[in-house]
Image (cartoon, helix red, strand yellow):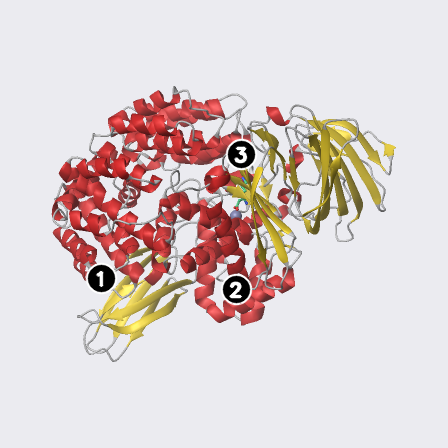
Amino acid sequence: PQTIYLKDYTPFGYIIDAVDLTFRLDPTATRVISRLSLRPNPEASDPCFFLHGEDLKLISAKIDGQDIAPRLIEGGLEADVPNAPFVWETEVEINPQANTALEGLYMSNGMYCTQCEAQGFRKITYYPDRPDVMSVFTVRIEGNTDTTPQLLSNGNKVETGALSNSDAQFAVWHDPWPKPAYLFALVAGDLVAHQDSIVTMSGKTVQLAIWVRPGDENKCSFGMDALKKSMRWDEDVYGREYDLDEFNIVAVDDFNMGAMENKGLNIFNSSCVLASAETSTDANFERIEAIIAHEYFHNWTGNRITCRDWFQLCLKEGLTVFRDHQFTADERSAPVARIDNVLALRARQFPEDQGPLSHPVRPESFQEINNFYTATVYEKGAEVIGMLKTLVGDAAYAKALDLYFDRHDGDAATIEDWLKVFQDSTGRDLSQFKRWYSQSGTPQVTVREDYDGDTFTLHMSQSTAPSTEQPNKLPQVIPVAVGLLDDAGNEILPTQVLELDQDEKSFSFSGMSARPTPSILRNFSAPVMLTQEGGNSRRAFLLAHDTDPFNRWEAGRMLARASLVDSITTGSAPNPDYLSGLVAVLSDTTLDPAYRALMFGQPTQSELAGILHESSTAPDPQAIHDASETLRAAKAETLADMLPDLYAQNQVTGPFSPDAEAVGKRALANAALALLSRQDGGATAALQYQNSDNMTQQLAALAALLDVGAGDDHLAAFEAQWSHDRLVMDKWFSLQIMQAKPEDVADTTRRLTLHADFDMKNPNRFRAVMGALSMHHAGFHHDGGAAYTLLTDWLIKLDPLNPQTTARMCSAFQTWTRYDAGRQALLRAQLERLVATPNLSRDTSEMITRILG
Ligand code: B3K
Ligand code: ZN
């Protein structure tokens, strides 16, 4: 396969002034007629006329109305074209029903839909399928009136009508905003709408609709509220107004990812938009709100300003994730949102950045771009924006964003453009900051302390492990937010941002009559790994006193981590300071329940494996599992007296609401329930299961019951109750694997793949089962490697059908070199079997090749 490099970028030789598409829909033989008005691009030097195209049957091609015979070549076609404006026309035939890759035009439950980002448009028609080619699209869709009563595309609907002599109808959509092909979308099917409208800041009325399959219309109101809140928030905080007469969202059951920001027609995985109290957990509600916001925010950061090429993906994704994080922090609790983001960063981005798949936030080469929609591009990309904002300050950030929208509206921009906006508006030199985009790896920051009776000094150093492509990492500019506390926990120096921009740098604070306690990296001001002084007694002090909520939580987390690492390596009992610190925090009713619920958590087993590996110990998955269970049991025992109260005091009464307050109480009560069940054998959980009127309560009760081995009947009852609901059944599949004992995980998974409702073609169902298998740390790595073989078998089966979802699941193997020689040999054997599979997709082959290193 071919490797594409950032350094090779050249502009396309032609400008497309207008695109006219006609679709004659048919499940197995859809015709697509494309009419492009082109002229030579004065800024391009290469006049080669190459159009991408894949899996297309060419019916005809014309230039200015004259039939021509283009040269069909690998990945597209070439033709000789005039050196003057001309009209290019092709007609192709495609087969949506045969499209199991879910990229291009495909069918899901009898409904037509599209996914074009990154390079799916080339499976619809011949086109320069690259984000810097932007044009104005007009789309005519013709479809059967019975099977496709709704015909949707981007922009505003301008015409509809019946087709003469047949049972077909048509609709014409016009999108006035020039866009790249990856933002094109079409949906046709039997859909019903949940409708609403909003008046934008300039007084324009926009029609809003969420389109779903009949029967799902009662699951749309939460998503609609989230949409309206997002639209208002973007006006209030970024001054960005919506720019079309209508905004449509469609829910689709078969979708490779969460959702897609197509202009004016967002397409969502139904799991990321459909919500009801009975079927969705609080976590689902929160995720739905965040994804609706994310896709909506792309209208400005992604659509109005798009990317010049796919190497610039973080320009839209990092910024849009940062914006959706800001939105969640504003709508819900800021500290809780920050902790959630850091948990996700550590769970997904740190392992990626510390293993064979490590790549810069802006990669410099790829084979398959779909493999680079990663935690690094998204989550670390958002952290980079957050650091930039911290460094320049809130006011300067706001000013820079105004300039960005002014200067680049309508552009396909680059990271250089983005940084220049900040440089021009703040005068700050960002050449060193740019290393956050170009260097891979997680920086390690170490802090030493000094006190001489008056001056307190923090000696900071940074280093990033070398990588094959970057053997010499240069120092980055790291904003380290620091506050100082006295012995009683009073803040004697409020949070300051120190800029660690060299390998080593010291920061002094004079006039200190006593030695202060520093609280370092407050609010997780940079995506780094921190080593500091003070050990467990420092952690216990900060857990009791830190005025920064993030660092207070972090202190508890680090205590738990140290306790677990000790237990794993020396067999010692759980740390009593951690347990008593926890009692104090959990009893403090002035603290938000959601925050206290997070305090219940402990490092994941996979995180612990990573920590052990960092300290040159091969992690033993069973030992990690046992130590984690022992700590949980110790917590249940230490907290025994307070659990019933914690549970009772945080019951939510009245009608269900997914607002932050109710969510926080349920989270705290359910965290208590999980431990309480170890005391009462599941009696309280069984009651909760019986009385629950919402999925959060029902699922938490079921999990607690399974955890204590008392859930089999409930599992069967759950299946009987919910077998008609695909999204709820995904939870049923996952939960059994998640709650299985390590030695039973592979068998449980195998048994579930034989269930009549296991459908590998549905990405949600495949992920519910195989994702749970790969995320059960001790089960996946259980002795003998049965789970490795099982996952590999299924990846080999899925790859010919759906390369994208297969490749994504391969990241389960990204940490394989952490483990002992025996496990490594088993893992290597499976990776080699996978990569040797005949006709393996480009997606999967690139992933496995990189993972093998
Ligand atoms: N931009 C899409 C992701 C497309 C993934 C293509 N493999 C959704 C999002 O980030 O909002
Ligand atoms: Zn996005």
> Is 144 drawn above or below residue 45 in the view shown?
above
Closer to the camera, 851 or 86?
86
The one of 821 and 111 positioned closer to us in this rendering? 111
Q: What's the residue type where badge 1 is placed? A: Leu
Q: How crowded is mark 2: few (under 14 residues within 10 Å), some or many (20 or more)?
A: few
Q: Where is residue 676 in the image (x, y as percent from the top left)?
A: 18, 42
- Label 2 beta carbon less than 8 Å to ligand 2: no
- Name the quadrant of the C terminus: top left
**What type is the residue that disc 2 sits on?**
Asp
Query: Mark 3 vs mark 1: which is more N-terminal?
Result: 3
Asked if the residue under mark 2 is in contact with the one under mark 3, i.e. CB atoms within 8 Å, the reply is: no
Frontmost of labels 3 and 1 is: 3
Residue 236 image label: 2
Residue found 36% across the figure and 45% down from its top: 282
Among numbered discs 1 and 2, the one appearing first in the sequence: 2
Q: In this view, does 435 lie to the left or right of 45?
A: left
SS at circle 3: loop
Helix, strand or loop under label 1: helix
Amino acid type at image mark 3: Pro
Query: Disc 3 marks which residue?
Result: 214
Question: Is residue 475 among the parts visible in the rendering?
Answer: no
Quarter that holds the N terminus: top right
Image coordinates of residue 447 in percent, x first then y, are 29, 62
Q: Tell me, for residue 724, which label it has, or none.
A: none
Give the farthest residue toward the front.
654
Choose top left, top right, bottom left or bottom right for residue 572: top left
**Residue 806 position in % (x across, y down):** 48, 30
Which residue carries the number 1 mark? 542
- N-term-proximal mark, 3 vs 2: 3
Within-10-Å neighbours for mark 3: few <14, some 14–19, many 20+: few
Secondary structure beneath disc 2?
A: helix
